[in-house]
Image: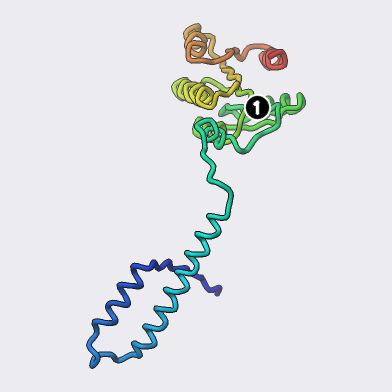
């Protein structure tokens, strides 16, 4: 059975308190070698002070502290950059994500798949996508609108030029109008040849 090693951090204040307790023990009750204990504690204190001093010297000898701007902080979210042509496909139907994944990979896109809104938001925060295609019903339009709102908000916050498109089997006019009002760049119904229409749009834009 392997041995688990644990590190206990002890600060100077703790050691001083312990040292003070040793001094308060009456001589007649010292059943252990307290002088040896004192020496050990003092040795630990000296080593800790030396480590602190070395840390200060190392810090002062390094380059000046960097002040991070707001835009730099926002860019930290996007540290993991994908290739120039990349797409996030969001749909809870595996057959759709598979078909679109194959199509866009053949066009030279780096493809990322998400099947629910929280996974989609997490991946969007981690990577910089220049194209997002999302289904409106994942599994209901309520979740779809929540995701659309969040993606549009994140794109604005990061000053991103991400193109966000909504695809759906719904033919309701109010769905189209609301998606465009919320900030979708395009809306496409899943009718005959919709994949071809989607590809043509993305290639032109």
Front one among 134 and 63: 63
Mark 1, secondary structure of its residue: strand
Residue 75 picture location, percent across and down: 56, 33
Residue 110 against residue 47 in the figure, above or below: above
Residue at 68% over, 14% down: 205
In the rendered view, does 185 fall on the left or right side of 40?
right
Which colour style is shown? rainbow
**Residue named by callout 1:** 87
44 versus 60 height, above or below: below
- What percent of the width, then of the height, locates residue 15? 36, 72
Quadrant of the drawing holding the N terminus: bottom right
Q: How many marks?
A: 1
Which residue in the rendered view is the most extreme toward the top? 173
Please tell me which residue is depicted at 43% across the width and 68% down the height of the picture: 8
Front in this rendered view, residue 59 or 90: 59
Pinpoint residue 183: horizontal percent, then vertical percent. 51, 15
Q: Position of residue 86 (x, y in %)?
A: 68, 28
- The answer, for residue 116, to whether it is visible in the render is no
Residue 68 to residue 135: above or below = below
* Residue at screen point 45% across, 74% down: 46
Residue 40's image quarter? bottom left
- Report if residue 141 is visible in the image: yes
Q: Nearer the viewer, residue 148 or 53?
A: 53
Residue 192: name its quadrant.
Answer: top right
What residue appears at the point 71 percent right and 13 percent down from the top-left corner? 204
Residues packed near mark 1 inside 10 Å, few (<14), some (14 to 19) or many (20 plus): many
| 29 in relation to 182, above or below | below
């Amino acid at each position: 059975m392997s041995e688990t090693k644990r590190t206990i951090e002890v600060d100077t204040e703790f050691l001083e308190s312990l040292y003070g307790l040793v001094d308060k023990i009456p001589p007649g009750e010292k059943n252990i070698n307290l002088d040896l204990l004192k020496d050990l504690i003092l040795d630990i204190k000296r080593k800790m002070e030396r480590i602190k001093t070395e840390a200060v010297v190392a810090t002062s000898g390094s380059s000046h502290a960097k002040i991070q701007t707001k835009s730099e902080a926002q860019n930290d979210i996007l540290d993991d950059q994908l290739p120039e042509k990349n797409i996030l496909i969001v749909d809870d139907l595996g057959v759709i994500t598979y078909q679109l994944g194959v199509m866009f990979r053949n066009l030279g896109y780096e493809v990322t798949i998400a099947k629910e809104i929280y996974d989609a938001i997490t991946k969007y925060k981690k990577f910089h996508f220049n194209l997002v295609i999302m289904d409106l019903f994942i599994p209901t339009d309520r979740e779809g609108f929540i995701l659309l709102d969040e993606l549009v908000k994140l794109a604005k916050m990061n000053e991103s030029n991400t193109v966000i498109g909504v695809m759906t089997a719904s033919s309701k006019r109010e769905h189209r109008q609301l998606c465009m009002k919320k900030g979708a760049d395009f809306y496409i119904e899943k009718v005959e040849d919709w994949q071809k229409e989607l590809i043509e749009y993305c290639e032109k834009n």
